[in-house]
Amino acid sequence: MSVAAAVIVGTIAGCSAEAPRAAGGDVAAAESSAEPTPIMGDLNGDGVLTPFEAEWLAKSKEAAAVRDFGMADGTVVEVDPTQPLPEVVRADIIGRFADDVAVTTSTTEGDVRDPRSESMLAKANELAAATGRDLMFVHPALSRVNAMDPLDTTSQIVWLSFNSAPEGGNPFLGPDYKTDRDAYIAAATEAAGTKYELLILD
């Protein structure tokens, strides 16, 4: 065999020997660049469900689960937290605040109104937990026209709102009060957005 032939044979043999390693490297690179398979609850997308993510997933499923809502008359209605409340449930909830509205529209005395307001907030949170829905309530209240003047007892009906809120949360995310009912409801509807289900107590 000539020297030239030996060089050609050696070159071909070297290429043949290195080819499998190059192919293997390509496979390894492809595998390392592949994205993790999506996992429900994997918040950071790393393909691993951490204990925190597993707990979050369990709570999310529980919060979205269909549940039975006990009506004031003793009947039970099925409620899906991912859907607007059935009209019968809305009417039932509104009826539970009838006595509260009767108080808020009849007196401006703080020693009467303040405990009632606290009761209404607590009730909102209880109903939000029972339905699985965040709730915002619009209601009328009697208000003094000139609160800075103790001698001026002139009053008027104003519209304001409150909402369910976790402990430490803000239960007054709605707009400032207005004397115009329709204008207030329009503003509250915008404030409620898709997060809160809006109920009118009047």
Image (cartoon, helix red, strand yellow):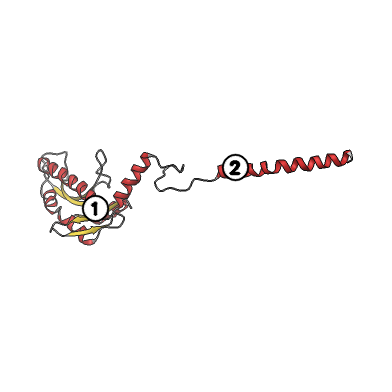
Residue 191 appearing in the image: no
Q: Which mark is residue 28?
A: 2
Front-most of residues 5 and 105: 5
Question: Circle 1: is it few (<14), some (14-19), or many (20+) Cα within 10 Å?
Answer: many
Residue 129 appearing in the image: yes
Give the farthest residue toward the bottom: 87
Q: Answer above or below: position of 81 versus 148.
A: below
Front-most of residues 21 and 60: 21
| Label 2 secondary element | helix
In the rendered image, which quarter is residue 119 located in?
Answer: top left
| Label 1 secondary element | helix
The x, y position of residue 20, in whole percent, is: 67, 43
Amino acid marked by disc 2: Ala
Q: Answer above or below: position of 91 versus 7.
A: below
Q: Quadrant of the N terminus?
A: top right
The x, y position of residue 120, in whole percent, is: 17, 47
The x, y position of residue 8, in whole percent, is: 83, 42
Front-most of residues 2 and 146: 2
Give the farthest residue toward the front: 1
In the picture of the structure, the residue carrying the numbered disc 1 is: 131
Question: Could you tell me how far apart the alpha carbons at marks 2 and 1 are, in whole angstroms?
Answer: 51 Å
Amino acid marked by disc 1: Thr
Question: At x 19% / y 45%, what residue is drawn?
Answer: 121
In the rendered image, which quarter is residue 98 located in?
Answer: bottom left
Tell us which disc is closer to us: 2 or 1: 2
